[in-house]
Each structure stands twice: as structure tokens, then as C-alpha cells.
Image (cartoon, rainbow, N blue to C red):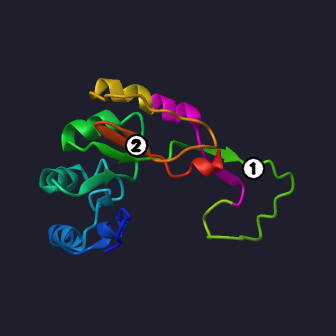
Amino acid sequence: MATGCRVTLHRAYDMCKNPFEAFETARKLGVDTILTSGQKNSCIEGVKLIKKLVERSSDIEILVGAGVNSDNIKEIAKITGAKSFHMTGKVVENSKMEYRNDDVNMGIPGLSEYEIYRTDEKNIKKTENCFSVIGMAGVLGFEPRKCQIQSLMPYRLAIPQCAYL
């Protein structure tokens, strides 16, 4: 499919009608990773499907996303058997704009113009501490402004919003 490149099927997978048929199609296409919340709004709600996918996934990595944080990562790993997690570690900060015009929305209606989402180093480090509890071998290295997918054998944590630190 993408010779020399790893391919991740993003959460569009969560919108498919038959997750097992889509899983087999992804396998045939050579997809390496499926990012999923288990076809629910959050991965906690989708743990049953995630567990079934992990059980089938000898050659496709199941990357659990949508709501992963330090408070639930141990539970998700225990229930599903997943070893790869996608999280932002975000905090919402108030904009420092002094003047605010509430009559104009410059983006998506309902999404505040005055809130900034940032990856928080403390949230990432708090999650790192959870890994030793679930049998993590290795240490998560987190450097602000230099973040990338961290490979941690046997677990993996993907942190996508590090550019916003």
C-alpha cells in the first residue's frame, strides 16, 4: 500500500458499519495501526470492542484513543490488553486576549475563541508513572517542544499535540 511507510487508519474506523469486516479489510490493505475508541465517544465506553480487536490483532496494532489519561490508562490496559495509547495530555487555558467580542465567532460555533488547548507536561509525566504499574519496561522521555511518538517496549504512547507546548 505505502511502500516503506507505516500506515495508520484513524478514527474514521469508528464510523464503519461492521468493525470486524473493516478490520479484515485494513489487514488486507496492509494497515499497520488502527486508532480507535471502540466505536464509542470515548475509549472507556468502547472497551468491549477494543478488547475484541486486540485479541484479533496479531499483525495490526490497536492504538486506543479518545479519552486516554493517567486516571484511566491502567484500567483500559487491564480490560482490553491494549499496549498502545494515544493521548493529548491536554489542559485548557484561558486566552490572554484582553478585548473579547462575543458577537463574532471566527471558527466553529460553540468552540470558544478564548480557550487554548495545550499538552501539559505534568499530565504526560503522571501517565508515565502509571506505566510501571501496568508492567511497562522502559521510561517515557518527555521533552517540551520536542515531542514525538514514544516507543516503550512493550507499550507505546502517542502524544499528538506536543507542538502546542
The percent position of residue 40, horizontal first and vertical second, equals 30, 59
> Along the line of sight, which residue is nearer the eye, 98 or 74?
74
- The residue at 58%/38% (across/down) is 120
Q: Residues within 10 Å of mark 2 (few under 14, many from 20)?
A: many
Q: How many marks?
A: 2
Specify the quadrant that holds the N terminus. Answer: bottom left
Is 121 magenta? The answer is yes
Q: Is residue 123 left or right of residue 105?
A: left
Return the residue at label 1: 95
Residue 16 figure quarter: bottom left
**Segment colored magenta:** 113-126
Determine whether, in the image, residue 164 is placed left or right of residue 100.
Answer: left
Q: Residue 117 in magenta?
A: yes
Q: Is residue 87 above or below residue 57?
A: above
Between disc 2 and disc 1, whose residue precedes? 1
State which quarter of the image contains the C terminus: top right
* Amino acid type shown at disc 2: Leu
As helix, strand or loop, the secondary structure at mark 2 comes to strand
Residue 70 pos. (x, y %)? 41, 34
Residue 157 - label:
2
Disc 1 crowd, CA 10 A, few/some/many (<14, 14-19, 20+): few
Q: Check if mark 2's residue and mark 1's residue have beta carbons within 8 Å.
A: no
Name the amino acid, label 1: Ser
Direction front: furthest residue:
4
Helix, strand or loop status at disc 1: loop
Residue visible at 27% across and 36% down in the picture: 75
Quadrant housing residue 122: top right
* Alpha carbons under labels 2 and 1: distance apart: 28 Å
Q: Is residue 82 above or below residue 53?
A: above
Of the pair 43 and 1, the residue shown nearer to us: 1
